[in-house]
Each structure stands twice: as C-alpha cells, then as structure tokens.
Image: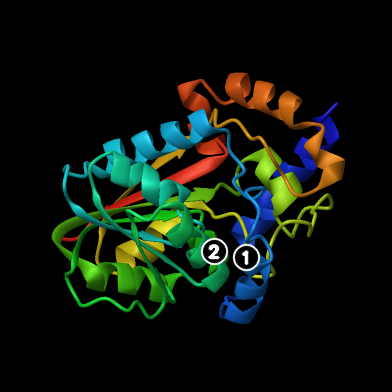
C-alpha cells in the first residue's frame, strides 16, 4: 500500500542530497501567530503522556544531566516538558517566543520559571546554565546557526544540550511534513519548519563549538495531528512505527533525530 510513496521518498532524498536548498531567516511573526493560535487548548500536545515521559527520560539519559542542574527548556511551549524536567529534580527555566503559551505555562505550572524570548537572542547571561533542552525547536529555523551559537553562549563549560527534531530521512515524516513531498500538508505546520537531516543539524552545532553525536528515536505514540484527513490513521501509524523502525539497522530512518552536544 505504501510502496509507491516510499519509492517517491527515495528518489526525492537523493535529489535533496545533491542540491540543498538555500537557507533563509526565520519569520518570527509567523511563528508567534501560529503558536499563539494554539494557546488555550492542549491539542498541540501531540504525544500520549507515557510517550512524553519516555522522551524526557531519553533526553535526560543522553544528556547525562546531573540532578539539581540549572536547565533551560528553550522553545518550551506551554511548559509540559519543562514541568516533567522539574519533577525529575532540575532547576528549570522555560522560554518561548509565544506570549500566550508562556501565559499558559505560568498558569498551569506555578512552580516553574517561564520567560518570553527569542532563541536567537536569549535574555540570559553567558555561562548561566548547566543544561539546555530543545524539543521540536531546531527544525523551525531555516538556518539554526544563530540558535546553536546562543545555546553555546549560555552553557557553562562542560554543559550539555539535547535537541529533538523530526527526521527528514523517515519516510512518513517526509511524506507528510516535508515540502518536497507530493503529499505534503500545510495543516498544523509553520512556514519556517522542515524535518532535519541528522548530518546537517549535527554540523551546525559542531561549527558552533560543540562536541556532537546523533541518536535516533521511534515508538513515540501520537495522540493528535492537526489534519483531520490523517488523524484517523494514527493507530495504524503508531503500530507500524513500533515494529518497522525497532531494529538497530533501521535507526537512521527512525522518525526522530536527537542531537547531543557538550561544550568543551
């Protein structure tokens, strides 16, 4: 049933490698309008609660964050992941560009410090954090170089970050979420975002000064996508994802890339 789309995916990824598109700046106004529009509802919390917990546990393990560390959750949205990190014993600050999502975070999680701000111009002093988390953030920057430089600036020497993004090499992420796909849907995405290529995003953070490694993740259970046409397929997608990408040799095709870095 998915043979033809997968063949299309393989041909398109070959073209992507041959001729990368020029980078552009992030349109921040579009980001604010998009995410402010999701304020007041939990619909954009796309994963099931147990998957949220699994993701945060994976991030903490890969980042080797020490309990009690001062941690910045950049692009925190309404603060769901920030609060999960706080519950695991971290001294957390959540930052987001959307004032309405920050308002929801403050109201929902009064024990967490939230601030409105821009990831490319962070309102924090240099070397003020032990750890940084970027969940679903880097792929919103057509060129994440400035974001990577700011993460480097605010981390202390020896500090670590973990970034989590959709993987362009995953057939389903490409088919539904990449603008080069004939099945691309603009529903529920911003004009800025695109799934990442693992080597490209690792290179960006490496050039910022980090020692970088890449991991991959599958098996996160979706509970929501914006497109009603696709939403009814989620149980089937979740079942396929759990089986198809579980083997180790399938790692580079898993739906999510985790970029892990340490500041020397």
Query: Neighbour class for label 1 at 10 Å: few (<14), some, many (≥20)?
Result: many
Camera-nearest residue between 16 and 260: 260
- Residue beneath label 2, please? 101
Camera-nearest residue between 150 and 102: 102
Could you tell me which secondary element the residue under label 1 belongs to?
A: helix
For the C terminus, give its image quadrant. bottom left
User: Which quadrant of the structure image shows residue 239?
Assistant: top right
Comparing labels 1 and 2, the label whose residue is closer to the camera = 2
Q: Residue at x 63, y 61 (%)?
A: 39
Q: Quick check: can you spot residue 76?
A: no
| 154 over 81 or under it: above or below | below
| Residue 157 percent location from the top left of the image | 12, 63
Judging from the image, the colouring scheme is: rainbow
User: Which quadrant of the structure image shows residue 209?
Assistant: bottom left
User: Which quadrant of the structure image shows residue 216?
Assistant: top left
| 69 over 60 or under it: above or below | below
- Considering only order in the chain, which callout, 2 or 1, is on the residue closer to the N terminus? 1
| Residue 71 percent location from the top left of the image | 26, 56
Could you tell me which secondary element the residue under label 2 belongs to?
A: helix
- Residue beneath label 1, please? 35
Find out whether the residues at labels 1 and 2 contact each other: C-beta distance under 8 Å.
yes
Task: Determine whether, in the image, residue 194 is placed left or right of residue 91.
Answer: right
Query: Neighbour class for label 2 at 10 Å: few (<14), some, many (≥20)?
Result: many
């Amino acid at each position: 049933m998915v043979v033809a789309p997968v063949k299309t995916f393989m041909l398109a990824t070959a073209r992507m490698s041959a001729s990368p598109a020029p980078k552009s700046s992030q349109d921040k106004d579009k980001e604010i309008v998009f995410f402010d529009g999701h304020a007041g509802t939990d619909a954009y919390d796309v994963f099931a609660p147990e998957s949220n917990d699994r993701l945060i546990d994976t991030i903490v393990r890969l980042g080797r964050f020490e309990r009690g560390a001062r941690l910045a959750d950049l692009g925190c949205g309404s603060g769901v992941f920030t609060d999960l990190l706080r519950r695991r014993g971290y001294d957390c600050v959540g930052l987001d560009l959307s004032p309405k999502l920050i308002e929801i975070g403050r109201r929902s999680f009064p024990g967490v410090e939230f601030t409105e701000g821009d990831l490319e111009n962070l309102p924090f002093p240099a070397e003020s954090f032990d750890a940084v988390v970027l969940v679903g953030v880097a792929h919103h920057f057509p060129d994440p170089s400035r974001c990577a430089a700011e993460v480097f600036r605010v981390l202390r020497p020896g500090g670590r970050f973990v970034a989590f993004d959709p993987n362009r090499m995953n057939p389903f992420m490409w088919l539904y979420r990449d603008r080069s796909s004939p099945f691309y849907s603009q529903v529920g995405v911003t004009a800025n975002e695109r799934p990442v290529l693992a080597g490209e995003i690792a290179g960006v953070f490496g050039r910022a000064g980090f020692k970088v490694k890449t991991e991959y993740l599958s098996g996160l259970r979706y509970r929501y996508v914006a497109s009603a046409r696709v939403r009814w397929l989620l149980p089937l997608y979740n079942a396929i994802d759990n089986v198809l990408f579980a083997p180790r040799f399938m790692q580079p095709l898993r739906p999510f890339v985790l970029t892990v870095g340490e500041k020397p």
